[in-house]
C-alpha cells in the first residue's frame, strides 16, 4: 500500500493514502505568493517616462534596482533581472515559468547565484516588466533583490534534513522574508542588508553577513525553548569582516525585535556619504563591538516596549507533507545502473536525517543552466522529490531533497538525458565564479569562464574522486568586491590586470585558507597569478599538499595548519608555498605566448575598462 510521510522534528508520521484521502496538497505548486502584479505595470510606465526624459537617470537607477533589475555591462538598454527565492525554495511551476521567460526575453539560460537568487541576463529594458508579469503568475518577485534594502533572505538547503541541526529554521527564514519585503522601514537603508539562516555550524555562512542565525534549543526552567545563536556585522567585499556573536542564546520571540533593532541602528548611524564604507560591517568595526552590542540590547528593549502586538513574525510551523512519488515510469527498462553512477552518488548526494532519503545536489557550470534543462528539471522534481520542490544553495547549485534511495539510479538516468548529471557538486571541482566581464560593470576579468575551465579540467582529471580534496573550495571573483566569496575559499581569487611593457593580461590576486564554518576565517593573500596560469598553480598547490600531508589530512585542514603556523613539514608558512609558486607566475612576452595575453572567452586584447557600479546606487 502506498504511504505518505509527514515530517516532524526528527521522525515521520506514516499514513496511507486512504488515511488522507483528498487532504494532501498539490506539492508541485508554489505555496507563497511573493508577487504584486501592479509592480509590472508601474515598471513599464516608469521605463516609458525615463525614455522620454521625464525621469532623471539617478532616480531611475534607484527605482530599477529596488525592483530587482541590475545594470548590464557598458549599456543602458539591457538589464539583469534578479529573481528572489526566499529560503531558496523553488517549485516546478516556477522553474517552468523561468524557463519560458528565459527563452522569450533573455539569452536562453539562467544563472543561480550564491545568494539563492536566479538571474536572467541581457534583458531589453522594455521587456523587464514582461518578466515581472510572468513571475507574478507563479508567485515570484524580484522586488528588493537589488538596491539598499533587505536582500533575499537565505536559508541552508539542508535545513530540515541536516542530522546536526536542532530544528528547521526554514519557517523563520520565510517569515523574516515576508515581514521585510516591501516594508517601509527597509526601503532606504544606507546600503544592502542581508540575513542568513542555516541548520548548523558547517552548512552556512552565518558569520559573513549582516545577520546570521543558527537554530538552537535550550532547556529553560525545565521547558524546551527554541531560539538562535545570532551573529552580527560580518560581510565580504573589498574589506571583509567576520561577524560577532550577539549573546549566548536569543529566544525565538526576540528574533524579530533583534532584527528590527539592528536595522534601526544601521539606518540611523550607517554612513550614507561614503559609498565605499556604508555596509553595516564598517559601522560595527568603527564603533567597536562592545559599544555596538550594548546599543543593540538597548534598542531591542525600546522596540519590544513600543512595537504594536500585531508586529510579529508569522511563522508557519505546519509540518511539510512528504509524499514519495508513486508513479515514476521506468521507461529506461530494467534496473541497469548507468556508468558514472557511483562517482555521482559519492560527490553529489548527502544522507538526510530522515531514514532512506538523500538530498541530491546538481552540478552546474558556474551556476548556469539552460532553458531546456530548466524545463526538464521541473518534471524531475515532480517525479523524484518527495517534498515537491527544490532548494537553491550557497554554491551556485540546486538541491533536490527527499529523494528516496531506491529512486537514485533512475534519477541519475533522467539527469543524464538533460545534461545535469556531472559529478563533483560537493567538491572543489565545482568552483564558484561570479558573472565577471560577461555582464558586470565592475568586473576586470572573466571569472565566470575561468570557473568553467577549471571545472572541466578537474573533472577530466577525476579530482572529484579524491577524498583529500572533497571539503575544499575554489571561489573566483572578477573584482575585489567578493561576489563569488573568494575571501572564505580554501583557494580564492579576485581579478585585476597585469602588464608587461605596454601589453596587458588578466591577473588574479590569490588567497588561501579561508573558510566559513565554525572556524570561520578570511583567506590570507599569497601572490598574484595570471589567468592563464591559475589551473597550473592550483594543481601545484595540490602537489605540495600531497607531498607534505599527514594521515587523515585534507587540503582544507592542511592549509588551515599552514596559515595558522602549526605545520611541521617542509612547508612552515604560506611564504614557503609562495616561493614554490613564484616561477610559475612569471609572464612570458607577447611574442613568446600571444594566448597568455587574452582573457578566457575573449579573442581581443585584454583591457581593464569598467562601467559605473550599482552596488550602492
Image: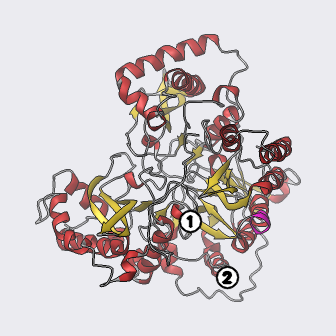
Residue 353, horizontal then vertical, whole percent: 54, 55
Q: Is residue 461 visible?
A: yes
The residue sitting at 70% across, 49% down in the picture is 320
Does residue 255 sit above or below 119 in this rendering?
Answer: above
Q: Is residue 232 visible?
A: no
Residue 360 falls in image quadrant: bottom right
- Tell me which segment is drawn in magenta: 101-105
Does residue 174 sit above or below 82 in this rendering?
Answer: above
Bin the neighbour count of mark 2 within 10 Å (Cα to Cα): few under 14, some 14-19, many 20 and up.
few
Residue 77, horizontal then vertical, whole percent: 71, 57
Q: Nearer the viewer, residue 425 or 528?
A: 528
Label 2 – label 1 distance at C-alpha? 28 Å
Q: Nearer the viewer, residue 476 or 252?
A: 476
Quarter of the picture holding the N terminus: bottom right
- The residue wearing badge 2 is 417
- The residue wearing badge 1 is 438
Quarter of the picture holding the C terminus: top right
Q: How many marks?
A: 2
Amino acid at each position: 500500500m502506498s504511504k505518505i510521510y509527514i515530517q516532524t522534528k526528527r521522525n515521520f508520521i506514516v499514513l496511507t493514502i486512504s488515511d488522507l484521502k483528498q487532504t494532501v496538497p498539490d506539492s508541485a505548486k508554489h505555496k507563497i505568493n511573493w508577487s504584486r502584479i501592479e509592480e509590472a505595470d508601474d515598471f513599464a510606465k516608469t521605463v516609458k517616462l525615463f525614455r522620454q526624459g521625464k525621469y532623471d537617470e539617478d532616480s531611475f537607477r534607484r527605482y530599477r534596482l529596488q525592483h530587482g533589475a541590475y545594470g548590464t555591462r557598458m549599456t543602458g538598454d539591457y538589464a539583469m533581472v534578479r529573481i528572489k527565492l526566499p529560503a531558496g525554495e523553488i517549485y516546478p511551476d516556477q522553474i517552468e515559468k523561468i524557463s519560458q521567460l528565459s527563452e522569450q526575453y533573455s539569452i536562453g539560460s539562467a544563472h543561480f547565484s550564491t545568494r539563492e537568487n536566479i538571474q536572467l541576463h541581457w534583458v531589453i529594458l522594455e521587456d523587464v516588466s514582461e518578466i515581472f508579469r510572468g513571475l507574478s503568475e507563479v508567485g515570484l518577485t524580484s522586488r528588493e533583490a537589488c538596491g539598499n534594502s533587505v536582500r533575499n533572505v537565505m536559508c541552508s538547503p539542508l535545513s530540515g534534513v541536516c542530522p546536526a541541526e536542532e530544528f528547521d529554521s526554514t519557517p523563520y527564514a520565510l517569515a523574516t522574508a515576508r515581514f521585510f519585503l516591501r516594508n517601509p522601514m527597509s526601503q532606504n537603508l544606507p546600503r544592502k542588508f542581508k540575513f542568513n539562516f542555516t541548520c548548523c555550524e558547517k552548512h552556512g555562512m552565518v558569520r559573513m553577513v549582516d545577520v546570521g542565525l543558527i537554530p538552537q534549543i535550550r532547556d529553560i526552567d525545565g521547558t524546551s525553548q527554541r531560539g538562535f545563536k545570532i551573529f552580527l556585522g560580518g560581510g565580504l567585499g573589498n574589506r571583509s569582516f567576520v561577524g560577532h556573536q550577539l549573546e549566548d542564546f536569543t529566544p525565538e520571540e526576540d528574533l524579530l525585535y533583534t532584527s528590527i533593532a539592528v536595522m534601526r541602528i544601521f539606518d540611523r548611524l550607517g554612513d550614507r556619504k561614503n559609498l565605499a564604507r556604508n555596509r553595516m560591517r564598517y559601522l560595527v568595526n568603527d564603533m567597536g563591538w562592545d559599544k555596538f552590542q550594548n546599543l543593540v540590547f538597548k534598542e531591542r528593549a525600546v522596540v519590544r516596549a513600543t512595537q504594536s502586538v500585531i508586529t510579529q513574525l508569522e511563522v508557519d510551523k505546519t509540518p511539510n507533507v512528504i509524499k514519495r512519488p508513486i508513479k515514476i515510469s521506468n521507461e529506461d527498462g530494467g534496473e541497469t545502473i548507468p556508468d558514472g553512477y557511483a562517482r555521482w552518488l559519492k560527490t553529489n548526494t548527502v544522507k538526510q536525517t530522515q531514514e532512506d532519503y538523500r538530498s541530491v545536489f546538481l552540478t552546474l557550470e558556474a551556476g548556469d543552466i539552460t532553458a531546456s534543462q530548466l524545463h526538464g528539471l521541473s518534471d524531475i522534481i515532480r517525479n523524484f522529490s518527495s517534498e515537491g520542490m527544490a532548494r537553491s544553495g550557497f554554491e551556485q547549485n540546486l538541491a533536490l531533497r527527499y529523494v528516496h534511495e531506491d529512486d537514485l539510479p533512475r534519477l541519475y538516468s533522467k539527469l543524464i538525458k538533460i545534461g545535469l548529471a556531472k559529478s563533483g557538486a560537493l567538491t572543489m571541482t565545482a568552483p564558484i565564479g561570479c558573472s565577471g566581464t560577461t555582464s558586470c560593470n565592475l568586473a576586470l576579468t572573466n571569472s565566470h569562464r575561468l570557473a568553467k575551465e577549471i571545472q572541466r579540467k578537474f573533472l577530466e582529471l577525476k579530482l572529484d574522486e579524491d577524498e583529500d580534496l572533497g571539503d575544499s573550495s575554489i571561489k573566483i571573483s572578477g573584482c575585489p568586491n567578493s561576489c563569488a566569496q573568494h575571501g572564505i575559499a580554501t583557494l580564492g581569487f579576485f581579478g585585476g590586470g597585469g602588464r608587461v611593457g605596454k601589453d596587458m593580461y588578466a591577473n588574479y590576486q590569490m588567497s588561501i585558507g579561508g573558510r566559513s564554518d565554525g572556524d570561520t576565517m578570511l583567506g590570507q593573500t599569497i601572490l598574484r597569478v595570471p589567468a592563464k596560469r591559475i589551473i597550473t598553480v592550483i594543481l601545484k598547490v595540490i602537489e605540495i599538499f600531497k607531498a607534505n600531508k599527514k594521515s587523515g589530512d585534507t587540503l582544507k585542514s592542511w592549509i588551515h595548519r599552514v596559515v595558522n603556523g602549526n605545520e611541521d613539514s617542509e612547508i612552515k608558512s604560506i611564504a614557503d608555498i609562495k616561493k614554490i609558486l613564484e616561477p610559475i607566475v612569471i609572464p612570458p612576452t607577447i611574442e613568446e605566448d600571444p594566448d597568455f595575453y587574452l582573457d578566457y572567452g575573449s579573442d581581443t586584447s585584454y583591457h581593464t575598462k569598467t562601467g559605473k557600479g550599482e552596488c550602492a546606487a
